[in-house]
Image: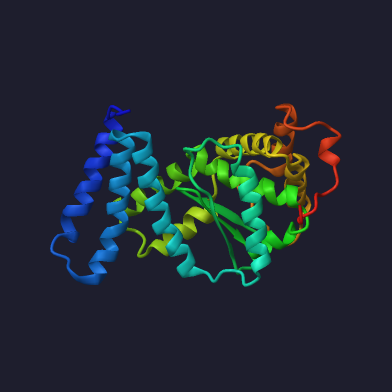
Amino acid sequence: MLRSLGFAEIVLIALLLLLLFGGRWIGRTGKAAGRSVRSPWLLAKWTWAVSTGTDEEGRRAEREFGKARAREVLDMYETASDPSKRELTERLSQQLCRTLPEETFPVTCAILASSERNAFALPGGFIFFHEGLFDEFRHDRDALAFVLAHEMQHVLLGHAREQLIRRFFLRAVTARSGGAGQLLKMVIDQGYSREDELEADRSAVALLTGSGFSPSGAVRVLRAFASSGVPGWEYLSSHPPAEERIRALQEAGAFSATSSTDQPGSAAG
């Protein structure tokens, strides 16, 4: 079904086309020029598909854009060498994805060889764990499933798309940053808004319970963050505070008082 263009979308597309074909990019040739133009070109293509095309065309363009950004992440980091970790994330993602509509994005996960305790999502369904966070909950499948479901919901709810487009477009307009790696680091470090995080929490817990996981995993992740005095707990470090997020989930009826104290689930399940 075709969508009508809003004024903001028309302005965005016009500016993107100007960035693509005007000013300092006119006349550039060679491999370096191709690299510099490809990212805004994919962004323009994606924005156009979302604004004027079908839902399927929009998803396809978003997947292509996210795939290009995922390659940049993998240029910045090595991946974890332990194959059992990759197998575990694949099992968890497959279980979570069984309850999603067929037309949603495929989920592609990777574990980065980094001691940071962090995880993040890119548009199109590309999700990354830092090994430090993965190892923190490796033997608690419900907690790992919550982290994965939380990042999946940032993609499905459009948070990852909106955040990266906003940051990418700002960088293109102001020309402040010299490379995509700096952009991605800014996106990863700055996190989401309070409303986005709370919405992703609620949706993630609903996905957990619908997929056969215990919602208690959400509480253990949030409480581990709230009680940790160890530097490097980057994950969920954006506002709101973890205790507020737990309280919001309880008030929304996401879990009962008893389920929030369940024992960790086995990662082997």
Question: In the rendering, at what x and y percent does residue 84 appear?
Answer: 68, 65
Q: Say left or right for 242 vs 51.
A: right
Q: Say left or right for 34 vs 162.
A: left
Q: Considering only vertical position in the picture, is 201 above or below 83?
A: above
Q: Quadrant of the N terminus?
A: top left
Q: Considering only vertical position in the picture, is 134 above or below 219?
A: below
* Colour setup of the view: rainbow
Question: In the rendering, at what x and y percent does residue 201 appear?
Answer: 64, 38
Question: In the rendering, at what x and y percent does residue 168 appear?
Answer: 37, 51
Q: Say left or right for 133 vs 18.
A: right
Question: In the rendering, at what x and y percent does residue 96 appear?
Answer: 63, 43
- Residue nearer the viewer, 52 or 174: 52
Q: Residue at x 17, y 53 (%)?
A: 21
Q: Residue at x 71, y 43 (%)?
A: 242
Q: Residue at x 52, y 69 (%)?
A: 77
- Residue nearer the viewer, 174 or 195: 195
Q: How many marks?
A: 0
Q: Considering only vertical position in the picture, is 165 above or below 133?
A: above
Q: Say left or right for 79 vs 59.
A: right
The answer to whether one can see residue 95 in this image is: yes
Corner quadrant of residue 193: top right
Q: Residue at x 48, y 53 (%)?
A: 187
The answer to whether one can see residue 232 in this image is: no
